[in-house]
Image: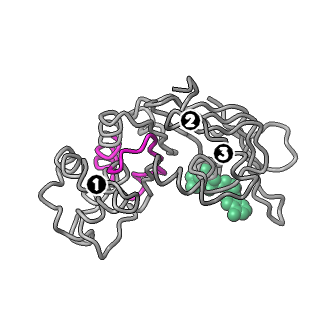
Amino acid sequence: MTGEPLLRLEGVERTHRAADGGFALSVPRLDVAAGERVVVLGPSGSGKSTLLDLLAFLAAPDRAESFLFSPDGHSHDIAALWRRGDRAALTRLRAAHMGYVLQTGGLLPYLTVRENLLLARRLLGLEVPGPADRLAEAVGVADLLGRRPAQLSIGQRQRVAVIRALAHMPRMILADEPTAALDAGLGERVIDTLVAVSGAVGAALVLVTHDEELACRAQGRIVRCQARRGADAPGSVVAA
Ligand SMILES: Nc1ncnc2c1ncn2[C@@H]1O[C@H](COP(=O)(O)OP(=O)(O)OP(=O)(O)O)[C@@H](O)[C@H]1O
């Protein structure tokens, strides 16, 4: 092992330029330890999705003193990969070690639940089914594996989306407002599922929400996106 946290950001910034001055997100320092639960909290427009895109290597930082990802005993220099424009390496790291739970669920409509669960494993060349059946059992959707997403309730779809993000046993799960489309009761169940299942497989969880109650329920370390003081253009600072 490297002794490094799973993810380390220091002096990382990303700016959205726009005619009205745009927006700048600044991350002075953010570490995510292996298996740790982190909740990113902030109001609408405070930069939560911008932060998640940075953490998922989907968007390039404009500045990064240090940006390291250590999922496999090696420390990968994400800032250097972006500088070199090595998107293939960034995509490989993301596919192998990260699971992403989208607001909308993001299931492919023409595949069965089972095929949706197996897709990431197949794309990575891993043997199937792997833990997919066990995960489906754990969240109560084992009876629904032969159905297509349209034949599920929204809550069932969200539970499938959560375990789909885990079926290739990633080291880190990123979840962007995974309860946005759900009523309060279902939202709580999705959070409970995310916490339980990521805990069971030992994956770190980074959960983004604007909802303080759901943030408390997840019982993670709170990281806030908060407005920068005295700055000339709008922006946020990420503060643990
Ligand atoms: N491509 C872009 N170009 C210009 N500005 C952008 C772009 N994407 C986002 N922004 C701005 O950056 C700021 C942060 O957006 P972001 O989506 O990260 O916030 P958020 O906290 O996730 O919001 P929400 O909770 O509403 O999803 C907003 O002011 C937004 O208008």
* Residue 174 lies within the magenta run: yes
Screen quadrant of the C terminus: top right
Residue 57: assigned label: none
Q: Residue, x 58% and y 27% (percent of image)?
A: 4
Ligand 1 position by quadrant: bottom right
Q: Quadrant of residue 65?
A: top right
Give whichever of 188, 148 is nearer the camera: 148
Dot 2, how many residues are within 10 Å of its Cα: few (below 14), some (14-19), or many (20+)? some
Q: Which x, y percent locates residue 122?
A: 34, 61
* Mark 1: secondary structure: loop
How many marks the image carries: the answer is: 3
Residues drawn in magenta: 167-191
Q: Residue furthest right?
A: 232
Q: Residue, x 79% and y 45% (percent of image)?
A: 63
Q: Which residue is mark 1?
A: 127
Identify residue type, mark 2.
His
Left or right, 183 with respect to 97, comes to left
Residue 78: assigned label: 3
* Residue 58 lies within the magenta run: no
